[in-house]
Image: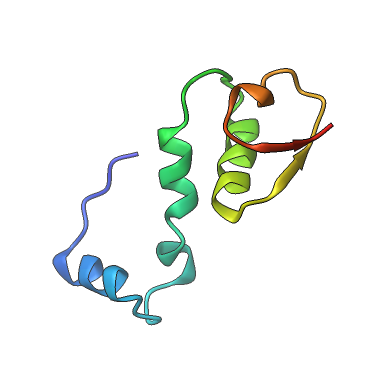
Amino acid sequence: MNLLLDTHVVIRYITGDESLPERWREMTHVLAYQQLPLHHRDPFDRMLIAQAQVEQLTVMTQDANFPLYDVVLFR
């Protein structure tokens, strides 16, 4: 994903300005998703992995691809 941001949006994002919509302030999941290696091409599983990493969650799954990522699993 490529974004073009106005300077005021960047400044508000960096300072945690709550006038920005929450979905704009919660870019950490998107950034984590983009940085995942392509061990697994299912976008929904990759979103779960990114969210688990950011939120420090344990994932309950039997998917054989999840252990390829740096995520805590309950198996």
For residue 11, side relative to residue 42 (left or right) = left
Residue 20 position, x and y percent, is 37, 74
Question: Depth check: 27 or 37 in front?
Answer: 37
Residue 72 position, x and y percent, is 68, 39
What colouring style does the render use?
rainbow
- The quadrant in which residue 12 appears is bottom left
Quick check: 11 above or below 5? below
For residue 59, side relative to residue 32 (left or right) = right
- The quadrant in which residue 6 appears is bottom left
Which quadrant does the C terminus fall into? top right
Residue located at (82% from left, 25% from top):
62
Quick check: 25 above or below 63? below
Residue located at (31% from left, 69% from top):
13
Question: Depth check: 3 or 75 in front?
Answer: 75
Q: Which residue occupies the extreme left position in the image? A: 7
Quick check: 4 above or below 50? below
For residue 12, side relative to residue 67 (left or right) = left
- The quadrant in which residue 19 appears is bottom left
Give the number of callouts.
0
